[in-house]
Image (cartoon, rainbow, N blue to C red):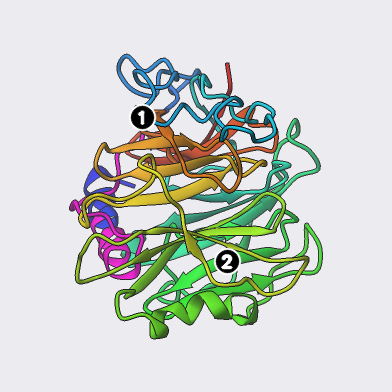
Amino acid sequence: MSVARRAIVASSMVGLWATTGWGCSSSSLPPLAGATTDSGVAVPDAPGDTGKPDGALVDAGVGDGSAGDVAEGAAPQPPPICPTTAAWGNGTALAISTGEDTFGAITPDERTIVWTSGGDAGGFTVYVADRTGPSVPFANPTVVPLAADGFVPGALAVSPDGLRVAALAPGMGFFLLTRSARGSAFGGSMTTTELATINDELSESETVDELGDPVFGQADQTFYYSRYSAAGGAIPTIFEATRTGTMPWGDGTPLSGPAVEETDAGQRRRPTGISADDRTLFYWDDATGAEMMAWRPTSTASFTTAASIGPRTGAQPNSACTAIYYSAAAGAGTGLFVAARQ
């Protein structure tokens, strides 16, 4: 894809995102980084980017989200799965990437990945690829049957077992496509039963105009997403819903804490991934133009601190938080990358 074509595609995607809850306030895609050279050798994600958190943790005045950060008298907590000192190496391009790809989601065991590809003539295609383990290549990707005008590009999630893909219908809320087993094709029938309570927030709240940014928790018992007010206003934007077993998701509750709360209606904080212990949230921060990691001392506490990990768009961790997957620049386009924790 030419540079000019990529600019047109980026503008088209932003137009969709801006009206559906994924939207950026700028006129182009969030900056991407982590490219490889023509020889496939990884190069730094950005000038001077070592993969380490950029500067000190954000000081919220309430601790650093570490194991010792719990209320007085509470039981001690183990260290978070994603350390507050986490540093990430240079990204390596995935072989399945075409150079016209936007990362969607990956399962905690790194065996199933979904992403959006293309953009020529305004069309986008969702792909899924499976593999038997994180040390082997992905099999050839197959198409997830979503009409180009029936979903919001980039706003994708995949369940931990790789059998459900959550997507966002413009102005209508979330829906699922399902399949019977890994390696098999996804069906084209959309279902909303599992997400009906969350979708009802659109009609039940006068302040909620759009939903967006779906993220499955790694145990499939939490679901993170965004709620936006198209008219603006300072409202909580990142929500967490829970459930028991395979029941439908309940009402979402807002995530709290200065590390994740939005302070400007035009500068979104968009959830992209969550650690296995639900204590480290990955999100894209419009205000800083960077991917962030935010920590809380327990899975029900407020997020107290955050640190930038640079322009690694859409980052999601594996179950051990030893690797992250994300979108990055690849020549004149964008690609799919993985980086290991150092």
Please tell me which residue is depicted at 64% across the width and 76% down the height of the picture. 194
Residue 21, position in %: x, y? 35, 65
The residue segment tinted magenta is 11-32
Viewer-nearest residue: 169 or 124: 169
Q: Quadrant of residue 249?
A: bottom right
- Looking at the rendered structure, the kind of residue marked 2 is Ala
Residue 206 located left or right of residue 225: left
Q: Residues within 10 Å of mark 1 (few under 14, many from 20)?
A: few
Vertical placement of 186 versus 135: above or below? below
**In the drawing, does residue 115 fall left or right of residue 206?**
right
Q: Locate residue 30, reporting x and y percent.
A: 30, 44
Number of dots carrying numbers: 2
**Is residue 29 found inside the magenta-colored segment of the image?**
yes
- The CA distance from mark 1 to mark 2 is 36 Å
Residue 209 is drawn in which quadrant? bottom left
Q: Is residue 335 above or below residue 158?
A: above
Image x and y of residue 229, in percent = 28, 69
Mark closer to the chain start, 1 or 2: 1
How many residues crowd around disc 2 within 10 Å: few (fewer than 14), some, or many (20 or more)? many
* Residue shown at the point (74%, 69%) measured from the top left: 179
Q: Is residue 126 visible?
A: yes
Task: Please give the name of the residue rendered at 69% of the width and 28% of the height, measured from the top-left corner.
Answer: 78
Question: What is the secondary structure assignment of the residue under circle 1?
Answer: loop
Q: For mark 1, what is the residue?
A: 61
Q: Relative to the observer, which residue lies in front, 7 or 272?
A: 272
Q: Does residue 138 lie above or below 63 as drawn?
A: below
Residue situated furthest bottom in the rendering: 203
For this rendering, which residue is in front, 323 or 101? 323
Quarter holding the C terminus? top right
Amino acid at the residue labelled 1: Gly
Determine which residue is flagged by label 2.
166
Q: Is residue 196 magenta?
A: no
